[in-house]
Amino acid sequence: LGICLEVGHIQRGTPQRRTVVRLVGKFRFWLVEAPQLHENGFALGRCEAFFDEALPIAELAGAVAVAGAAAAAEEDVGAAGEEPPEPRATAPQVAMVAMALLEAQLTHVGHGGRRIFGERFGDVPSAPAAGQPTTSAVLERLSFFLLGSMLTEAHERRQWLGSTDTRARLEHCRARLEAAGRRPVLNLPGASSWMQGQSAFSSFALLVGIVALFVAKALGLLEPGVLTRLVGGSWQHDEPMSDAFDFG
């Protein structure tokens, strides 16, 4: 599995700043023939591009199709005296919810975080307009933008890169963003190491450290000019050292 990339933009560096190259994914491909060493010294193989399966027309028609289907279903079950079933959200509607959740994440990271996000991922694409038809290609690109914008495990990322189900990928991204809530999940610089360092033990150790600081504050150990030590099981103050460090 691989991705064909195109150079979208190059920001030349300076002695104080490194060069930044923005790459844009064009299509995915499978390696169908093992690469062989070419006479010019590079490996040459054969690959085959693949794309997501086209979504049904009903999925692309937006909220209009959902409203029409819901009205028809209500008429059918109305005569039988049953409750109409809850209409299933279309793929564009799933994308709209996911993009709204992504915007909430960007709001939480502030202007600085939004700027860094823009430098890394480019402009945030627009969500499909409510009630307006869209295309499978637009939703496919949107699903990959959402997938790339979040912190994702390597096996999980590979799974969805190899998938050809646009709707399932959109639903996965929406579920990840919904489960995160206000917890940051954006793939920003440094976020990966921060997330990997989180564990139950580290959280407990942090809590113990905070409690220890409060206890030290209550005992006066953090007051300027006061040095204490434990001698023979009782606290004693070292007055000469206290005077030496008390300048005001």
Image (spheres, rainbow, N blue to C red):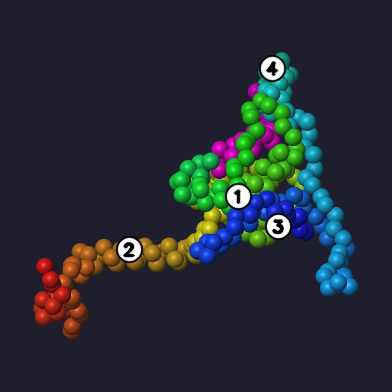
The residue lying toward the viewer, choosing from 234 and 9, is 9
Question: Which dot, 4 or 1, sits closer to the camera?
Answer: 1
The residue that label 3 is drawn on is 158
What is the CA distance from the residue labelled 2 to the residue labelled 3? 39 Å
| Residue type for callout 4 | Gly
Question: Which dot, 1 or 2, sits closer to the camera?
Answer: 1
What is the CA distance from the residue labelled 2 to the residue labelled 4? 61 Å
Disc 4 or 1, which lies upstream in sequence?
Answer: 4
Instruction: Name the element at disc 4.
Output: helix
The residue that label 1 is drawn on is 121
Q: Classify 10 Å Cα crowding around label 1: few (below 14), some (14-19), many (20 and above).
A: some
What is the CA distance from the residue labelled 4 to the residue labelled 1? 49 Å
Picture layout, residue 243 above or below residue 161 = below
Q: Which residue does the image show at 18% across and 76% down from the upper left?
A: 228
Question: Which dot, 3 or 1, sits closer to the camera?
Answer: 1
In contact (CB < 8 Å): disc 2 and disc 3: no
In contact (CB < 8 Å): disc 4 and disc 1: no
Question: Which dot, 2 or 3, sits closer to the camera?
Answer: 3
What is the CA distance from the residue labelled 3 to the residue labelled 1? 19 Å
Q: Is residue 70 visible?
A: no
Q: Classify 10 Å Cα crowding around label 3: few (below 14), some (14-19), many (20 and above).
A: few
Q: Quadrant of the C terminus?
A: bottom left
Picture layout, residue 108 above or below residue 196 = above
Q: Which residue does the image show at 38% across and 64% down from the upper left?
A: 206
The residue that label 2 is drawn on is 210
The residue that label 4 is drawn on is 78
Disc 1 or 2, which lies upstream in sequence?
Answer: 1
What is the CA distance from the residue labelled 1 to the residue labelled 2? 37 Å
